[in-house]
Amino acid sequence: MQRKGENQKEMLETFKMLAEDQLLRLNAYLMDLEKRPMTERREDLYRSILREYHNIKGSAGTVGQNDVMELAHAMEDILELMRQKKLEENEELFNLHYESLDAISLMIRSRLNGEALPGDVFENLHRRIEGAKHEVTPESSLLDSSVRQPKEETGKRHFLRKGNRHG
């Protein structure tokens, strides 16, 4: 009979393997979206990227990786704003996506290995995500019901709380 700790570690290992595949697909889709001219059909790529973020978010929640879940959720929101053309696609936004993929990978590995996460990296990422959300085009609004608003806690996203930085 497996002990609870062993079962949790096994679930995290499975989650890590699945997430690594999803992160690779996300990276490839984002690179394709970034390179594809605005004149070409892009909706299929947006749907694929949103699906991968959504799958990571759901899987992370299942294994108690709330920090990963919150970051995937935040990036899903940013991508939806891009898809709706409420945020203009630019190099900075794509870099934010790529850095978030790296951060998700780091969070998963750190949790699995019982290591603390470097908070300064996540604080910077948080500031940039929130900054991007405030650059929505004037004719749109962040209060648009088609884009979910993040849960706030003392002005910080949940995945950035000090209590969630440790494995």
Image: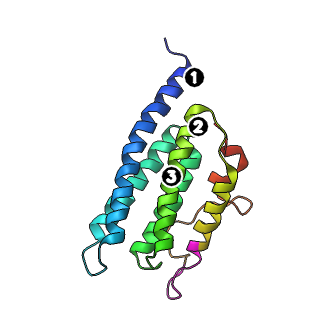
Image-based side of 128 in relation to 137, left or right:
right
Q: Position of residue 105 (x, y in %)?
A: 50, 46
| Residue 51 visible (yes or no) | no
> Which residue does the image show at 38% across and 48% down from the upper left?
22
Most common secondary structure along the magenta stretch: loop
Labels 1, 3: front one: 3
Residue type of the residue flagged with mark 1: Gly
Which residue lies most toward the top here? 1
Residue tagged 3: 102
Q: Which class describes the residues within 10 Å of circle 3: few (<14), some (14-19), or many (20+)? A: few
**Residue 63 appears in the picture as rendered:** yes
Q: Amino acid at mark 2?
A: Arg
Q: Secondary structure at mark 1?
A: helix
> Which residue is more in the foreground, 125 or 46?
125
- Say which mark, if any, is on residue 111: 2
Q: Residues within 10 Å of mark 1 (few under 14, many from 20)?
A: few
Residue for point 42% across, 33% down: 14
Residue stretch in magenta: 132-141
Residue at 54% from the left image edge and 51% from the top image edge: 103
Q: Which residue is mark 1?
A: 5
Marks 1 and 2 sit apart, C-alpha to C-alpha, by: 13 Å
> Percent position (x, y) of residue 144?
51, 76
- Spatial distance from mark 1 to mark 3, Cα to Cα? 26 Å
Q: CA distance from mark 3 to mark 2?
A: 14 Å
Q: Tell which tag, 3 or 2, sits nearer the viewer.
A: 3
Of callouts 1 and 2, which one flags the residue occurring earlier in the amino acid sequence?
Answer: 1
Amino acid carrying label 3: it is Asp
